[in-house]
């Protein structure tokens, strides 16, 4: 694996021409209002578009979840920026791996909150409302499921696109 320690990743261990996917969750270090979230999202969209990075951002109840897709040389500085960002604490890498093709082909950064996602998977709402990131794998699965669904709706647990 390409981990040096907790949030440090050895991006040089990846082929520079190989797409990768990096996913993580973190806790917000302070309350994030709608304006703060909009500013964060606007900055991410702009930065990612300029870097040819795609992905999805999830936020609710003080928990961030994000998937970044791109080449190691473009993901590395974004990851360093996230790790240094005082808005994040307790960053946990969920996965980093090679990617055959992008899941979020037309999105420099999609955004979803738990209200949108939990309509389709109600048990996620309970875990988030408890203030615990006790469901990190479920968050990752849901973020991945919104990738190429019609209207950006997440998959239901049976694997079918939701109506």
Image (cartoon, rainbow, N blue to C red):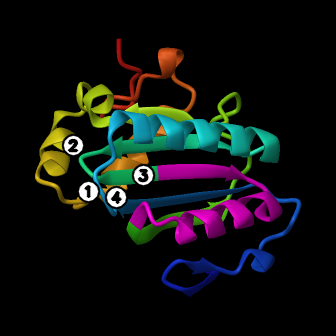
Which residue is drawn at the image coordinates 61% and 51% (left, top)? Answer: 68
Separation of disc 2 and disc 4 at Cα?
A: 18 Å
- CB atoms of marks 1 and 2 within 8 Å: yes
Which residue is drawn at the image coordinates 71% and 44% (left, top)? Answer: 48
Q: Earlier in the sequence, mark 2 or mark 4?
A: 4
Q: Earlier in the sequence, mark 3 or mark 4?
A: 4
- Horizontal side of residue 110 vs 63, given as left or right: right
Tell me the number on the disc at residue 124. Answer: 2
Tell me, yes or no, whether the highlighted magenta stretch contains residue 155.
no
| Relative to 19, residue 79 above or below | below
Tell me the number on the disc at residue 28. Answer: 4
Q: Which residues are magenta?
A: 66-88
Q: Earlier in the sequence, mark 1 or mark 2?
A: 2
* Closest to the observer, 80 or 10: 80
Tell me the number on the disc at residue 65. Answer: 3
Q: Answer few, some or many: residues within 10 Å of disc 2's Cα (few below 14, many 20 plus, some between 14 and 19).
A: many
Tell me the number on the disc at residue 135. Answer: 1
């Amino acid at each position: 694996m390409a981990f040096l320690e907790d949030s440090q990743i050895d991006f040089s261990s990846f082929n520079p021409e190989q797409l990768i996917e990096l996913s993580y969750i973190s806790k917000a270090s302070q309350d994030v209002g709608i304006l703060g979230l909009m500013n964060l999202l606007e900055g991410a969209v702009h930065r990612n578009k300029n870097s040819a990075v795609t992905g999805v951002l999830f936020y609710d109840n003080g928990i961030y979840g994000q998937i970044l897709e791109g080449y190691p040389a473009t993901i590395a500085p974004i990851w360093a920026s996230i790790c240094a960002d005082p808005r994040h604490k307790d960053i946990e890498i969920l996965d980093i791996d090679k990617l055959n093709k992008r899941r979020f082909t037309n999105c420099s950064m999609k955004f979803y909150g738990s209200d949108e996602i939990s309509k389709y998977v109600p048990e996620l709402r309970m875990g988030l409302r408890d203030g615990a990131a006790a469901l990190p794998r479920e968050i990752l699965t849901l973020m991945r499921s919104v990738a190429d669904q019609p209207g950006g709706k997440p998959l239901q647990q049976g694997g079918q696109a939701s109506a």
